[in-house]
């Protein structure tokens, strides 16, 4: 095998990224992964390769690489990095050298120990009332589109990359000739790229969310993005609003997807329908997902201000509350 260290920068030289463009032998493997996943693999693998260069290691055999990777996983663990960084390093090497993971026995044992000592943690689901409170606060701060995106992500189990990459043409009513369903009260989303594959979709169910999205798309030009945010911009806004509301800090944008699926289960939606809406590849993964988060809901606690706001949201029409917020800003 070629010297691994030659693929990263040495001090004083230019950098060569371990990305899809530099992994010529693995383009088909890269194509099976979401861009965000490739980006994680890229970053963490490059960190490992740079670590080897900085420490003067240039393995030419797989056993030597295995030994160094095992040392690096221990290094990563001792410095407090999470399981995601360790997994991404190992799987990133598989992209760089297809088949190599089957030849790394020591590193696999280290990764198994990593998982036992530092298991991955799932982010908790949001409830619909708390989601509405977050959306209303976004709107009050002047971020109407972010508020609508938040409600849509909960309703349609959307990942952040899915709703930040929606275009005007990706939204269709049931009366749209492209659908041919003849039901103007229905609304569908085309999801061009998802974690589980391209060209998927989901129906928007909540009447208030459909009404809000209908208002939004009337203002979006042909070919325009529905929500003018990228992943990082929305995350920053989401966390700032949650901090202002004094919500627990373990809520993340993905909590909207978690919460929507759990809400579907609690309101008697069938597991098959939840699986289809959430675009899970297997019913087994969907079952574990929903059952875990149902229990997580029970363990949550909120400050009195959030409880009071949720009571208001639960007893008044959402569109009426949004209208009041908008009028109050005039």
Image (cartoon, helix red, strand yellow):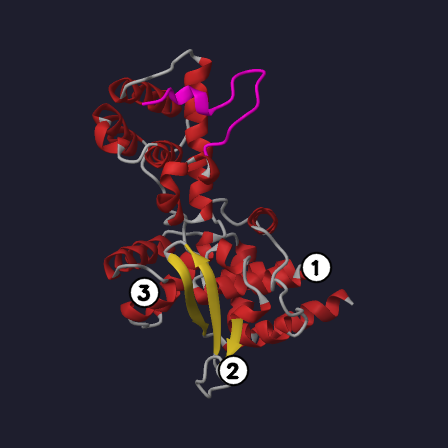
The quarter holding residue 53 reads top left
Residue 6 as seen in the image, left or right of residue 323: left
Residue range corresponding to the magenta coloring: 1-18
| Residue found farthest to the right | 330
**Residue nearest the viewer, comparing 323 with 304:** 323
Residue 282 as seen in the image, left or right of residue 322: left
Q: Residue at x 37, y 63 (%)?
A: 278
Which secondary structure, mark 3?
Answer: helix
Estimate how packed mark 1 is, as few (under 14), some (14 to 19) or many (20 or more) residues with alpha carbons within 10 Å. Answer: some
Name the chief secondary structure element in magenta. Answer: loop
Residue 142 is labelled as 1
Residue 115 percent coordinates (x, y) = 28, 34
Residue 275 is labelled as 3
Closer to the chain start, of discs 2 and 1, is: 1
**Residue nearest the viewer, comparing 83 with 324:** 83
Residue 51 as seen in the image, left or right of residue 244: left
Task: Determine whether label 2 and label 1 are within 8 Å by CB.
Answer: no
| Residue found farthest to the bottom | 182
The alpha-carbon separation of the residues under discs 2 and 1 comes to: 32 Å
The alpha-carbon separation of the residues under discs 2 and 3 comes to: 25 Å
The alpha-carbon separation of the residues under discs 1 and 3 comes to: 35 Å
- State whether residue 104 is above or below residue 315: above
Residue 280 percent coordinates (x, y) = 32, 60
Estimate how packed mark 2 is, as few (under 14), some (14 to 19) or many (20 or more) residues with alpha carbons within 10 Å. Answer: some
Residue holding disc 2: 176
């Amino acid at each position: 095998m070629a010297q691994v260290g030659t693929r990263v920068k040495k001090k004083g030289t230019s950098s060569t990224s371990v990305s899809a463009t530099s992994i010529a032998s693995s383009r088909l493997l890269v194509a099976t992964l979401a861009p965000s996943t490739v980006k994680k693999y890229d970053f963490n693998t490059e960190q490992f390769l740079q670590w080897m260069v900085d420490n003067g290691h240039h393995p030419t055999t797989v056993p030597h690489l295995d030994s160094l990777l095992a040392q690096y996983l221990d290094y990563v663990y001792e410095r407090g990095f999470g399981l995601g960084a360790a997994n991404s390093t190992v799987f990133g090497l598989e992209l760089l050298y297809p088949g190599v993971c089957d030849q790394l026995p020591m590193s696999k044992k280290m990764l198994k120990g990593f998982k036992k000592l530092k298991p991955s943690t799932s982010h908790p689901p949001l409830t619909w009332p708390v989601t509405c409170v977050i959306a209303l606060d976004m709107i009050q701060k002047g971020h109407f589109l972010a508020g609508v995106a938040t409600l849509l992500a909960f309703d349609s189990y959307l990942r952040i990359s899915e709703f930040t990459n929606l275009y005007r043409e990706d939204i269709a009513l049931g009366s749209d000739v492209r659908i041919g369903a003849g039901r103007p009260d229905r609304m569908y989303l085309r999801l061009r790229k998802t974690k589980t594959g391209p060209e998927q979709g989901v129906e928007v169910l909540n009447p208030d969310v459909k009404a809000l999205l209908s208002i939004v798309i009337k203002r979006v030009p042909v070919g325009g993005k529905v929500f003018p945010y990228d992943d990082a911009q929305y995350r920053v806004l989401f966390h700032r609003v949650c901090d202002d509301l004094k919500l627990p800090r373990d809520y993340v944008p993905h909590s909207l997807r978690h919460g929507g699926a759990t809400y579907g289960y609690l309101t008697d939606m069938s597991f098959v329908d939840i699986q289809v809406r959430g675009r899970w590849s297997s019913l087994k993964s969907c079952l574990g997902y929903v059952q875990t988060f149902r229990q997580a809901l029970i363990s949550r606690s909120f400050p009195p201000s959030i409880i009071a706001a949720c009571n208001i949201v639960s007893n008044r029409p959402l569109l009426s509350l949004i209208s009041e917020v908008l009028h109050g800003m005039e």
